[in-house]
Amino acid sequence: MEDLVEYLNTFPVITRAAIALGIFVAANALFFPATVLSVACGFLLPLPLAIPIAMFARSITAVLCSASSRYLLRRWATTGIAERKNLAKIEQALSQEGWRGIVLLRLSPILPSGPSNYLLGLTRIPLPSIFLGTLVGTLPNTLLCTVAGSGLIALAEIRKFRLLSSQKGQILIVVGLLATALLVWRLWRIRSAQSKKP
């Protein structure tokens, strides 16, 4: 491991940042977990650079995946969603929530970012709102993971599964579950209000 760190340090920081950004976007678009990629950013880059690179990469990936699914699958999905009333109401409620709904979606530990990036493209949420919601909603997870990666403690912690059993990890899980509950509640409220309309 020390050899790898020494080798990586032979490259200028800007080169490592560009490589990290490119790999992050490509790997996350192919469903590689963003959490692991954020840890890698913290490992490869100085922390003040790792955090914005990881956050920007997550947001750009969300926009690229959403745009691709929107333009490639929208017609097919529109027909499929219209045939299922519950799915149509969920899509409509999420689209009405916009970036706020995406923040809650991103705070949820239940939904992986890869598939949700593509599914967001099937909604009517504007791409800038997807970028903003992802940027804000992934902040806690990105901070935790890049800090863990920067200290090289993350490798030992992940190996021993202590990352999630630490106090900070448990707090993030609780916040994520609360965000999921809030998202479900808000979508249910919007759906209930819509079903009462004539």
Image (cartoon, rainbow, N blue to C red):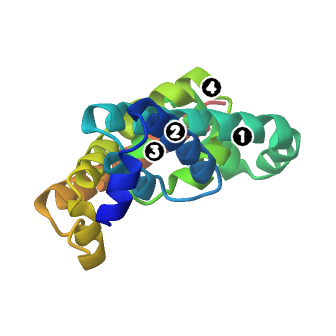
| Mark found first going from the N terminus, 2 or 4 | 2
Give the Cα distance between marks 2 and 4: 20 Å
| Mark found first going from the N terminus, 3 or 4 | 3
Residue beneath disc 3 = 105
Give the Cα distance between marks 1 and 3: 15 Å
Residue beneath disc 2 = 21
Residue beneath disc 1 = 122
Give the Cα distance between marks 1 and 4: 11 Å
Residue beneath disc 4 = 127
Residue 100 placed where, x, y %? Answer: 43, 30
* Mark 4 crowd level (few <14, some 14–19, many ≥20, 10 Å Cα): many
Residue 172 placed where, x, y %? Answer: 24, 53
- Residue depth check, mark 2 versus mark 4: number of the one nearer the observer: 2
* Mark 1 crowd level (few <14, some 14–19, many ≥20, 10 Å Cα): many
Residue 96 to residue 93: above or below: above
Task: Give 187 or 145, whichever is nearer the viewer.
Answer: 145
Q: Quadrant of residue 3?
A: bottom left
Q: Secondary structure at mark 1?
A: loop
Give the Cα distance between marks 3 and 4: 15 Å
